[in-house]
């Protein structure tokens, strides 16, 4: 059976790791860890722009064909019929994907209110402060929660927010499915059914919320000093504290105001 390729994007700290682990219980679905596929395609474009032979004899149709082949064959070694390629950067590149594939692509996006995203970051930073604090020190900033949150907003979360907004604008409404964190946590099985229906996949009736396992380790944030960023509990449930309690009133209100600038939910 020919594989169908889909994409997953979204905000950090919005439940994507748990969602992926549960979807991977289905025999019909393979959700990748943070995928290198977008990087491969960007390097391919860079090579096309720099290789002397392609500069001398440009052939954009050939580049498109090669890129399409990369997309269609990248996960052919997997047996599942539906591949969900996960990378937060896809949101800014969906028009290029549509050009390469010649068809509309379905996109799953995980989302959460911004103050809760930032509160989750701050909770992690309090556990593993060394990297962020060293960055602040090198740049001459005092080590405060305000500056920590500034670093995580401008150099991590803001770009994913923009990617999510761009995908929402460029992907056809019928091909864009938003998974809200709170809705997912409150009724995970129903949300999994909705994802399956969106993708046109047969329902898997034995999702196990009491034994959630990742198929592969995802170390995409190890360089940021978060070794257990994608650690998930073996059983399903919400344990995060109230965002205002974690951030304090001033930071909470600041991210409420920032959130109003984006139409992503």
Image: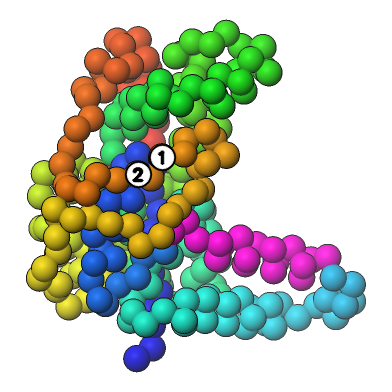
Per the image, the residue denoted by label 1 is: 228
* Residue under the image location 14 percent in, 64 percent down: 207
Q: Main secondary structure of the magenta part?
A: helix
Q: Position of residue 90 (x, y in %)?
A: 49, 57
The x and y percentages for residue 168 are: 37, 53
In the rendered image, which quarter is residue 175 located in?
Answer: bottom left
Q: Is residue 47 magenta?
A: yes
- Colour scheme of the rendered structure: rainbow
Label 2: element kind: loop
Any magenta on residue 34?
yes
Picture residue at 61% right of the left edge, 11% below the top = 141
SS under mark 1: loop
Q: Which mark is residue 231?
A: 2
Whether residue 191 is visible, yes or no, is no
- Identify which residue is drawn at 10% across, 58% down: 190
Whole-percent x, y for residue 20 in the image:
31, 58
- Using the image, determine if residue 215 lies above or below residue 221: below
The answer to which image quadrant residue 117 occupies is top left
Which quadrant is home to the N terminus? bottom left
Part of the protein shown in magenta: 33-50
Q: Quadrant of the C terminus?
A: top left
Asked if one can make out residue 39 in the rendered structure from this viewpoint, the answer is: yes
């Amino acid at each position: 059976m020919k594989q169908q390729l889909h994409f997953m994007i979204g905000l950090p700290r919005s439940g994507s790791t748990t969602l992926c682990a549960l979807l991977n219980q289905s025999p019909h679905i393979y959700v990748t860890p943070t995928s290198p596929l977008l990087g491969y395609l960007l390097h391919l474009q860079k090579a096309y722009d720099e290789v002397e032979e392609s500069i001398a004899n440009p052939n954009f149709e050939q580049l498109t064909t090669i890129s399409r082949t990369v997309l269609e064959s990248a996960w052919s070694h997997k047996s599942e019929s539906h591949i969900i390629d996960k990378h937060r950067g896809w949101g800014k590149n969906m028009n290029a994907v549509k050009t390469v594939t010649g068809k509309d692509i379905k996109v799953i996006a995980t989302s959460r209110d911004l103050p809760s995203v930032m509160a989750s970051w701050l909770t992690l930073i309090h556990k593993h402060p060394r990297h962020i604090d060293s960055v602040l020190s090198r740049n001459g900033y005092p080590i405060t929660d305000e500056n920590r949150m500034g670093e995580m907003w401008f150099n991590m979360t803001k770009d994913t927010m923009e990617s999510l907004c761009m995908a929402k604008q460029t992907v056809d409404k019928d091909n864009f499915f938003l998974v809200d964190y709170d809705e997912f946590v409150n009724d995970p099985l129903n949300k999994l059914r909705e994802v399956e229906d969106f993708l046109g996949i047969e329902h898997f009736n034995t999702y196990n919320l009491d034994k959630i396992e990742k198929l592969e380790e995802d170390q995409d944030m190890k360089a940021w000093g978060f070794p257990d960023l994608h650690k998930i509990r073996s059983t399903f449930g919400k344990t995060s504290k109230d965002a205002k309690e974690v951030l304090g009133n001033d930071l909470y209100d600041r991210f409420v105001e920032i959130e109003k600038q984006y139409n992503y939910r």
